[in-house]
Amino acid sequence: MRPGPRRPGGGPGPGGRKGEAPRPPARQPMGDLSTFDIRERITSSVIDTYGTMLALEVEPLAEEPPPGYGIHRLVGTLNFAGAVTGIFNLQVTETFGRLMAGRMLEQEPAEVDLATDVRDLLAEVTNIVGGNLKSALNDAGHPCVLSTPSITFGTDFTIRSLAMDRFERMAFRHGEHVFVVEAGLKGVEAAEAGLEFCTPEAMSRLPHVDAAKLEALDPRAKIAAAVTEVFETMFSLALAPVDTVSASSLQGKRLVSSVCFAGDATGVVSVHVGEELARRMAANMLGVEPGEIDDEAAIHDMLGELGNIVTGGLKSALTDTGLRCALSTPSVTAGTDFMIEALNLDRYERFAFEAGGLPVFAEMGFKISDLVKAAPRGATEVHYRVEETPAAGGEKPAAEAGRATPGRPAAREPSPAAQAAPPAAPHPGPAAPAAEAPALPEDFGLDLLVDIPVELTVELGRSRIPIQELLRLQPGSALKLSRLEGEPVDILANDVLIARGEVVVKNEKYGIRITEIAGRRERLRGLKD
């Protein structure tokens, strides 16, 4: 009987015995990206993930793999942003993708659904291997964050990330199947990277978001205005929105410029143009005739700059609301037969324009982190305490004496005569203790509640299925959840989201290591029920 799939994490963690929580490696100071061993990190992660998760033995290949043109392929993609920007691609054939999904679901390859099972699994594996690379970069002193995954599929396309300092392309084999992993990385100056939020410690702090600005923000209008302005100012082309496009205009080679952003707000902005229009845009920008543009790199650089400007405008609008996010480097996907599907986004829109009778498409998708969405709107958190100096004679200051406390009304204000009376001489003796700091509004009466037990729930994920599928469930059935492997789990207090964390095992018991936590006021909301 074929062994069932196993999830990563069943064996001993680094620095610990089986059953103990792994000890995180010490964070190193900012290092040199040129010395970071990309190939070794990816190779070990790929072998471990395929072995533990899918029970598939894979081995690295020394020779360059054959090109995949004409073969139906799927590519899972992640983007890095922060002190390191770049791209991570995991490319498999449809045949091998079906084999992977069949192993995971314990089905025959022909039985799995290409549109859901294979793509979902590829996104999950991409998240795991890309996430391991991101963790290794953080530990090596290169703090960064990841975008949500996307899947590109078709028979004729290439994906290139522009202006990389390092690029590695590795091939692996399982039996007769060959798959490819690519990683391109670029170091970014600290001021440009936004390092204050890229570290795990900084990302665990809740940002101060202007709810009114966030609700008033119209991302689609922002993108449409930016694309129109760039076409006019950079390419001398008038852009007009359209409701319909002809099917014939979608044929032939097309190019897609994509820039991702990640952080409190995560998403992607893409601009699609045909090869003819792309050549005209580059010619107008350089002041030459379209026929003189014979360098594909010049077209890609132009599209990368277009993506940077358009996405940068949306990123600035998001950061103006208080959300923290950083941009990835642009990537360009080119070919005659492909589709791109961005995953795990709350909102996704695509709209069309025309420039000189040729179509232009813009796509925009994003999501706000769960902790930001769970934060109370308009709430203010106080991150300091006030110590008041006691009045002479050990008496509390007037402001303290007049404050109401639980179970006791506020004292009346003294009469003018009493206010004018000189203070009594202090009695000799030990100094009076310092007055206690005033409690925060949400803390009044909290001492009466601190011993009340609160039910904590850890939510691994959710799934929505038809009733007929519900009725078919039986022991041994597998349920797919919305959460991907490697994503943090939700921690709720009385059904209120208060934190997120990662699953650990200690003394043969499951536990949660908290990685993100909501503010104090939000956590106290869990006491209301």
Image: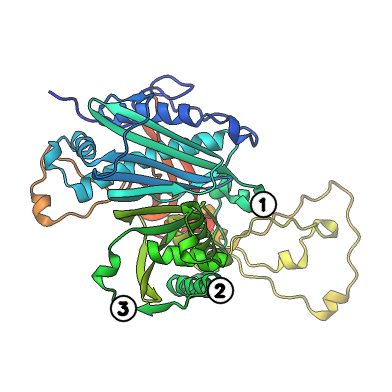
**Up/down of 270 relative to 180, above or below:** below
Q: Which mark is residue 119?
A: none
115 or 459, which lies in front? 115
**Residue 121: % across, % down:** 27, 42
Q: Is residue 419 visible?
A: yes
Residue identified by numbered label 1: 191
47 or 198, which lies in front? 47
Residue 408, located in which quarter of the rendered image? bottom right
| Amino acid type, label 1 | Ala
| Amino acid type, label 2 | Thr
Q: Secondary structure at mark 2?
A: helix
Q: Which mark is residue 233?
A: 2
Q: Are marks 1 and 3 in contact (CB under 8 Å)?
A: no
Residue 17, located in which quarter of the rendered image? top left
Question: Which sits earlier in the primary sequence, circle 1 or circle 2?
Answer: 1
**Residue 47: % across, % down:** 35, 26
Q: Secondary structure at mark 1?
A: helix
The residues tagged by marks 1 and 3 sit, at their Cα atoms, a distance apart of 41 Å
Left or right for 509, reference 513: left
Residue identified by numbered label 3: 243
Q: Is residue 321 visible?
A: no
Q: Secondary structure at mark 3?
A: loop
| Amino acid type, label 3 | Asp
* Residue at image location 28% in from the left, 76% down from the top: 244
**Residue 201: % across, % down:** 57, 44
**Residue 284: % across, % down:** 52, 69
Question: Which sits earlier in the primary sequence, circle 1 or circle 3?
Answer: 1
* Residue at image location 24% in from the left, 45% down from the top: 70
